[in-house]
Structures are given as C-alpha cells and as structure tokens.
Image (tube, grey):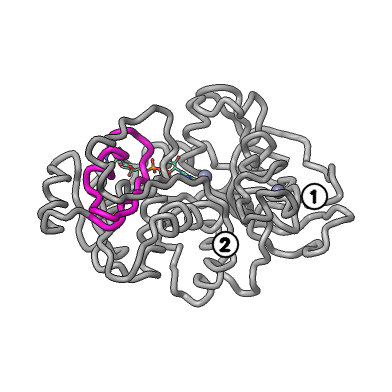
Amino acid sequence: MKALVYHGAGKKSWEEKPKPVIIEPTDAIVKILKTTICGTDLHIMKGDVPTVTDGRIIGHEGVGIIDSTGSAVTNFKVGDHVLISCITSCGKCEYCKKSMYSHCTTGGWILGNVIDGTQAEFVRIPYADNSLYPIPAGADEEALVMLSDILPTGFECGVLNGQVKPGDTIAIVGAGPIGLATLLTAQFYSPSEIIMVDQDDNRLDVAKTFGATHVINSAKENTVEKIMKQTNGKGVDVAIEAVGVPATFELCTDIIGAGGHVANIGVHGKSVTLHLETLWSRNITITTRLVDTVSTPMLLKNVQSHKLDPNKLITHHFRLDQIEEAYNTFGNAAKEKALKVILTNE
Ligand SMILES: NC(=O)c1ccc[n+]([C@@H]2O[C@H](COP(=O)([O-])OP(=O)(O)OC[C@H]3O[C@@H](n4cnc5c(N)ncnc54)[C@H](O)[C@@H]3O)[C@@H](O)[C@H]2O)c1
Ligand SMILES: [Zn+2]
Ligand SMILES: [Zn+2]
C-alpha cells in the first residue's frame, strides 16, 4: 500500500509500505476512505514531536471501512463504515474507567505518533471496539472527519473545561480549525457574546460567518483595551486559548473577569509567566486538557440532526496520492485561505 512516511525533520515521502496486519485480537484493519492533516502533523514535520521517529506513517484523523478484524472485536464486522478517533483507548484501565481516554495506559494519542497512522491506504486500529465509532447509514462521511480530533478538542478542552453557560461573554484566542471548532460547539450553550481574536483577517471573517459577535485582530488592535471596553471593564467570563504560545495564554489571563475560567487548548513548547500577583484574588479557574474524545457520540448525533455543520471547516479537497501538495496548501494556510483539507482514497 501507499502511505505518507516521516523521515526526520522536514523530510516526508509518499511511498510503498507493507499493508498493516492484525497483531492483537482486539485490532481492526481499516481501509481509509477520507483523511485530513492536523496542525499537530505540521509540528511533527518540523521535528517538534520527538516520539515520532524515522519511518513512521503519520495522521490521526479519518473515516474508513473495516477490512479485517481480530478475533476479540465484537462491535464491528468487515464492510462497516467507521469513524476513527485520534485517541486510542482500551476501555478497561483506571483512566479509561474515568473517561480519561487520553491517558489510557496502553493507548492515548498513539496513532500517527508511536504507531503508524491514517495518512495511508490502510491503518491498524488497536482496541477497535473502543477506538472506532459506527457511521450511521447515509451520513456525510466527509463532515465526520472533523469529529476525529478538532470538534471534540474544541468542545472538551475549550467549552466543557471553560464551563461556558447561557449569557456568558466568552473570548476565543486563535481562529484556526481548533478555535473555530470551539466557536461552533460553544453555541450549544448560548453565550451572549463571543469575541474571536487572531492575527489573520481571513480567519476572523470566517469566524463572523460562524457566529462570532465581535472579532479583534491582535496584530493591529490593543486586544486587552478593546475587550475591557466591550465588557464595561469587567473582563470575560470564559477565555479559551487555542494557539499554544506564551503571549496568547497571558492574554487570556489579562482579559479574564472575576470568577472566570481560563481554558487552555494549545500545545505549548515554552513556559509562560503566570501573574499570580494579580490573579490570586480573582477567583479564577485555569484548566488544561488533552482531548479525551468522550464527547464524540454526542457530537455525531448533533451532526446527524444538523445542529452542527462541520462541512464549514473544509476548504480544500485532494486525492490521497496528492498529499504532498495538500501539505503545501495546509502549511501556507494564511496565503491559501485554508482551514481543513480533505484527502480522498479513490
Ligand atoms: N489540547 C489538545 O488536546 C489539542 C488537540 C489538538 C490541537 N491542539 C492545539 O491547539 C492549537 C490550535 O490548533 P490549530 O490546528 O487550530 O492551529 P493553527 O496553527 O491552524 O491555528 C492557530 C491560529 O492562531 C493564530 N495565531 C498565531 N499567533 C497568534 C497570536 N500571537 N495572537 C493571536 N492569534 C495568533 C494563527 O493566525 C492561527 O489562525 C495548537 O497549539 C494545537 O497543537 C491541542
Ligand atoms: Zn490533531
Ligand atoms: Zn485504557
């Protein structure tokens, strides 16, 4: 089969690899129908994720068809259409029992990281019964690719951890696919105001069409001043960090109102300054989370009922064998006006 293989920082190739085989009785082999590229894959390509080693097939999102199953798989049979979760979970360990699948002792984020991933014609999925979701007949499978990672991430790490409530004023810092997924799912709870902050005017324009009530280009405007004016000097009820750099985390702690929640989503590579000298008395909560994908079945229902339209996040289409071109487009997102790209295995 063909697959996208990482060969060290800056090096990748679309090349021939052996078709995966069942190793454990709980495995399934899935033929990929559609996959995509994540911001995290760009980090991997830069060499930022040391657990990914030379020869690894990357990718942790997608939908496909069951090609074969191990003897212990009971939820799926050959030919079933499935949604692949970016998080692999055994369903039995202490963390899985607490619905903290991201910390499964033999799973978590392993796909396209420490085991081969989904940017390939076939992928081996461990603990298939727990790590795959059945796709309802007639579902829009392309839209469901957005449920492998970005929608549960925005919802769980941003909206749930931020405890967004009806009437809240919320700020989302970062209008990439994750920030926009947060914007879409925050609206389940009817916040009264959603302020979107980014440095890319195109993404801010997209955010307006997705339901942002105010947008701020932080490269051109004084964000703290503008948000304080907007909130009568009080600050926001919930500030969600969806970038992953010190400046944006500190911005969230600068704009948070008394009693508010700062929910971090971004993957950080550098330490940030925590201004406890001003924050200690403000009754705020700061949360962090690696996506657990426990909300996937709920999100699937809301896509089916058209309460949530993930298609809005898809801007570009390619054949799977055009994946290197797709990386160039996604890697130049601002210039290409790209959000998510869909790769189809024809
Ligand atoms: N916690 C988790 O489980 C989890 C899961 C998936 C992704 N992530 C992380 O979420 C973050 C967002 O992911 P994404 O795919 O949307 O990334 P992205 O790079 O596509 O989007 C980031 C956005 O931030 C904007 N930005 C950059 N610097 C900024 C600044 N100083 N001020 C304001 N805006 C700025 C960019 O213009 C861009 O639109 C990343 O750090 C990613 O690694 C976390
Ligand atoms: Zn991802
Ligand atoms: Zn587990």
Residue 121 seen anywhere in this rendered image of the structure: yes
User: Looking at the picture, how far across and down is residue 330, in whole percent?
Assistant: 43, 41
Range drawn in magenta = 236-262
Q: Amino acid at mark 2?
A: Thr
Q: Which residue is mark 1?
A: 27
Residue name at image x 11 percent, y 58 percent: 232
Q: Above or below — where is 315 with respect to 24?
A: below
Q: Quadrant of the C terminus?
A: bottom right
Residue 344 seen anywhere in this rendered image of the structure: no
Farthest right residue in view = 71
Q: Dot 2, how many residues are within 10 Å of its Cα: few (below 14), some (14-19), or many (20+)?
A: many
User: Looking at the picture, how far across and down is residue 93, in whole percent?
Assistant: 73, 49
Q: Which residue is mark 2?
A: 296
Farthest bottom residue in view = 305
In the visual, does 78 lie left or right of 135? right
Residue name at image x 54 percent, y 61 percent: 142
Q: Earlier in the sequence, mark 1 or mark 2?
A: 1
Element assignment for label 2 = helix
User: Looking at the picture, how far across and down is residue 22, in whole percent?
Assistant: 84, 45
* Beta carbon at label 2 within 8 Å of ligand 1: no
Number of numbered labels in the structure image: 2
Whether residue 239 is in magenta: the answer is yes
